Amino acid sequence: MRYLILSDIHGNWEGLEAVLRDAEGDYEQVLCCGDLVGYGADPNRVVDWVRERANLVVRGNHDKGCAGLDDLEWFNPVARAAANWTSQSLTPDNLAYLRNLPKGPAVMDSFQILHGSPLDEDDYLVSNFAITQVAPYLERQLSFFGHTHLQGGFLCHRNGVIRLRRPEGAESREVIELENDGLYLINPGSVGQPRDGDPRAGYLIYDSDARLVEFRRVPYDIRAAQAKIRAAGLSELLADRLEFGN
């Protein structure tokens, strides 16, 4: 089975549209590690597509916040304003969909998907130390997570924690062949707001039969996404950062 694995779309239709064009014909099922909305100006268009096409989705912190399931006081002012705008912009059906998204981890065949950490869906997994702390609690050898907006991941085995290579510079793809031993925590990257210094939309294809993970990056119409953010009256920062991938 070939899976298209997405995360952190954040209402960016242009980013999602570019990913779908790039991945066309290369997958059979769609999974999402959360944060469909927040920051971007197309929350309904994104949620409509996910509702129709995704096979499994777990909630992210922005999904919770925009759906009224979480206190927005701990969001920074820019994120809070965007969440309030998103809440007011979403259709009743899409708000209900977000409210009913499951909390991760969620098991899919021989692997699982989650948003943050298996111990706390709102925690960030960015360091080798954090990986060693959560490894004993993983329910599957392979887990896909989001939240950090950093494409890549970790292999945790008897020799310690190894960071997985992602596409860099002009590269658009990086293939990882999974080993039989060890635990993998893999982040597909952010479709709608990358923060690893690469403004291209990030995602991955997982071939469960061949045990191959392919990280991908694809350029998209950043100017159009920025124009929509500005037209919606959202923070200029949200538009500017798309250009730099931070």
Image (spheres, rainbow, N blue to C red):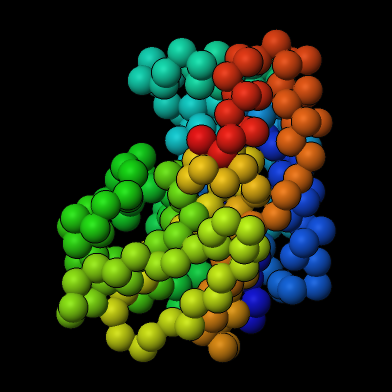
- Horizontal side of residue 70 vs 93, given as left or right: left
Q: Is residue 178 above or below residue 48?
A: below
Decide if residue 30 is in sight here: yes
Query: At x 63% / y 15%, what residue is drawn?
Result: 236
Q: Residue at x 74, y 73 (%)?
A: 26
Q: Is residue 8 visible?
A: no
Residue at figure coordinates x 51%, y 70% from the top left: 108
* Image location of residue 130, percent across then percent down: 23, 53
Q: Nearer the viewer, residue 244 or 88?
A: 244
Task: Give the quarter of the image for residue 86.
Answer: top right
| Residue 120 x/y as whole percent | 30, 45
Which quadrant of the view contains residue 182? bottom left
Image coords of residue 224 (percent x, y) = 81, 31
Quadrant including the N terminus: bottom right
Residue 235 vs residue 80, the one in the foreground: 235
- Which is nearer the eye, 169 or 226? 169
**Left or right, 110 with reference to 2:** left
Number of numbered discs present?
Answer: 0
Image-quadrant location for residue 5: bottom right
Percent of width and height locating residue 215: 57, 66
Q: Is residue 101 left or right of residue 164?
A: right
Residue drawn at x 77%, y 61% as measured from the top left: 22
